[in-house]
Image (spheres, rainbow, N blue to C red):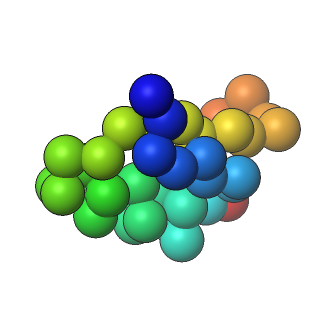
Amino acid sequence: MLDSLIIGAGISGLSTAFTLKQNNKNILISERQPRVGG
């Protein structure tokens, strides 16, 4: 089961994803561009 959906793989999205994964959450990151980082 998905705990969080993160829209955007910029610095904020990646930081949020990192924190959530440290807390054992199941996440999905959705990014429009073919690369991450904003």
> Residue 5: horizontal and vertical position, in percent?
60, 47
Residue at 73 percent of width and 28 percent of height: 34
- Does the rendering let one see residue 24? yes
Answer with left or right where residue 11 lies relative to residue 23.
right
With respect to residue 13, does 34 lie above or below?
above
Is 19 left or right of 29, judged from the image as shown?
A: left
Looking at the image, the residue that sits furthest to the bottom is 12
Residue at position x 49%, y 35% from top? Answer: 2
**Could one spot residue 37 in this view of the protein?**
no
Q: Position of residue 3 (x, y in %)?
A: 45, 46
The answer to whether residue 12 is left or right of residue 21 is right
Query: Which image quarter is the N terminus in?
Result: top left
Q: Residue furthest front?
A: 1
Describe residue 10's horizontal placement relative to residue 23 as left or right: right
- Percent coordinates x, y for residue 13 in the rendering: 55, 61
- Residue name at image x 41 percent, y 54 percent: 17
> Number of labelled discs?
0
Q: Residue furthest right?
A: 32
Figure quadrant of the C terminus: bottom right
38 or 6: nearer the eye? Answer: 6
Residue 32 to residue 19: above or below: above
Horizontal and vertical percent position of residue 22 = 17, 55
* Quadrant in the rendering for residue 33: top right
Q: Nearer the viewer, residue 19 or 3?
A: 3
At 58% from the left and 40% from the top, the residue drawn is: 29
Q: Work out whether 7 lies above or below 34.
A: below
